[in-house]
Amino acid sequence: MKKLIALTLVLLAAGCSSYKDVRPGLEGIHQISILGEDVKDTESNAYKQANAFCKDQKKKAEFLSDETFKATPNEVDVDTKMFKKSESVATDVSFRCI
């Protein structure tokens, strides 16, 4: 029984990890904010997470807005240890599942 519970917890954790940055919002409008070093990779990661989040609901993502900008530790309210370089890229995406 303990092994079954442990396996269930592992599977649940693995399922959530495919969209760890999604922040479910009111009225079905969800947000993703990702900090990275490369514009293409950061945007791609955000869109993949949104699509995975909606796919789990058997829906498709409708993207409402996205913004990618250069960011320094002083411009973004995060721990400076997250920055690998003096400048990084922040991507913010809003979407809903339809």
Image (cartoon, grey):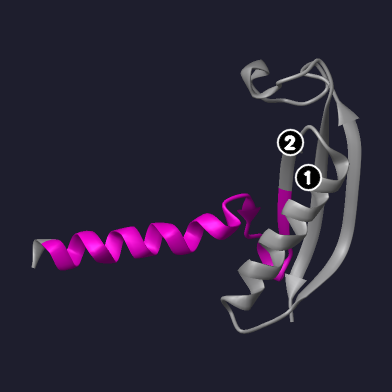
Question: Which residue is denoted by mark 1 in the rendering?
Answer: 42
Residue 94 percent across, percent down from the top left: 80, 58
For residue 37, side relative to residue 68 (left or right): left
| Distance between the alpha carbons at the discs numbered 2 and 1 | 7 Å
Residue 18 percent across, percent down from the top left: 56, 59
Nearer mark to the viewer, of 2 and 1? 1
Magenta includes 75? no
Residue ID at (79%, 54%):
44
Residue ID at (62%, 60%):
24
Residue 57 percent across, percent down from the top left: 58, 79
Residue 61, by quadrant, is bottom right
Please tell me whether residue 52 is drawn above or below residue 55 in the rendered image.
above
Secondary-structure class at tag 1: helix
Q: Amino acid at mark 1?
A: Thr
Q: If you read the primary sequence from the N terminus, does the residue marked by circle 2 or circle 1 appear first?
A: 2
Q: Quadrant of the N terminus?
A: bottom left
* Secondary structure character of the magenta stretch overall: helix
Residue ID at (83%, 20%):
72
Question: Which residue is denoted by mark 2 in the rendering?
Answer: 35
Please tell me whether residue 5 is drawn above or below residue 31 in the rendered image.
below
Q: Nearer the viewer, residue 41 or 5?
A: 41
Residue 83, by quadrant, is top right
Secondary-structure class at tag 2: strand
Residue ID at (89%, 58%):
65
Q: Are marks 2 and 1 in contact (CB under 8 Å)?
A: yes
Instruction: In the displayed orientation, state which residue is furthest to the left.
Output: 1
Q: Quadrant of the C terminus?
A: bottom right
Q: Amino acid at mark 2?
A: Leu
Residue bounds of the magenta highlight: 3-32
Please tell me whether residue 80 is drawn above or below residue 8 in the rendered image.
above
